[in-house]
Amino acid sequence: MLRKLILASASLLALAAAPVTANAQSPYGFYVGVAGGGVSAGGGYAGFGITSSGIYTGIEAQYDFGNGEHNTVLPGFGPLSIGRDHTFGGAGRIGYAFDKETMVFGKVGYAFSHYTAKDVFAGISEKKWQGGLKVGVGVEREIAANFALRLDYDADFASLKLPVSGINSDIVTQTGRVGLSYKF
């Protein structure tokens, strides 16, 4: 998976270096996109942003589905598997547009994820929705009129409390994604 992320990153950087012949994009607007990679098998995002004097501000909603799983051993438990399969989130984005085609950005928001914990020896399985802080960074490059490639990295923080299995643990899920956006 890391190899795919590195190859996707190299491809995005190569596209960022290539000249773009698209028309100048509007300083504000809506966008939708699809993305995949990391512990996120896939997902989508939608948002709205405004660019003024090179400074970008906007908001974004995001959904990811996947099979991210972490295996560990906690004191008093057997082998424990904690998985995350669905995540809904929202974030404010702020960025800097170097030109009309390339922008770097950061984001801060909230993510709400569905977790499943399984204790293999005890036969306990428990599911719960839990939310927490979302932070991220990324780069976006317009590749054609109204289309942009995006490479981003998010870290989602949650305090997972599962009363049946007695788990009370902080979870950090890190996700790298490559996305394609359509701006209108």
Image (spheres, rainbow, N blue to C red):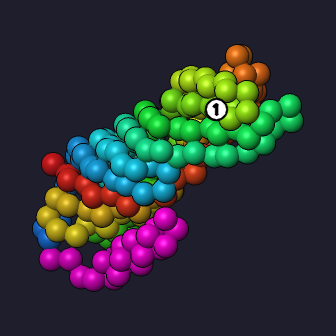
Q: Is residue 20 magenta?
A: yes
Q: Which region is colored magenta?
A: 1-21
Q: Quadrant of residue 120?
A: top right
Residue that badge 1 annotates: 118
Asked whether residue 162 is in view, the answer is yes
Query: What residue is drawn where x is 72% and y is 22%?
Result: 165
Amino acid at circle 1: Lys
Q: Quadrant of residue 156?
A: top right
Left or right: 128, with 120 as reference point: left
Residue furthest to the top in view is 163
Report the predominant secondary structure element of the magenta stretch.
helix
Q: Quadrant of residue 90?
A: top left
Left or right: 52, with 165 as reference point: left
| Coordinates of residue 54 in the picture (x, y in percent) | 37, 61
**Vertical placement of residue 69 versus 120, above or below:** below
| Coordinates of residue 8 in the picture (x, y in percent) | 39, 71
Residue furthest to the right in view is 75
Query: Camera-side residue: 92 or 162?
Result: 162
Q: Is residue 88 magenta?
A: no
| Coordinates of residue 107 in the picture (x, y in percent) | 49, 47
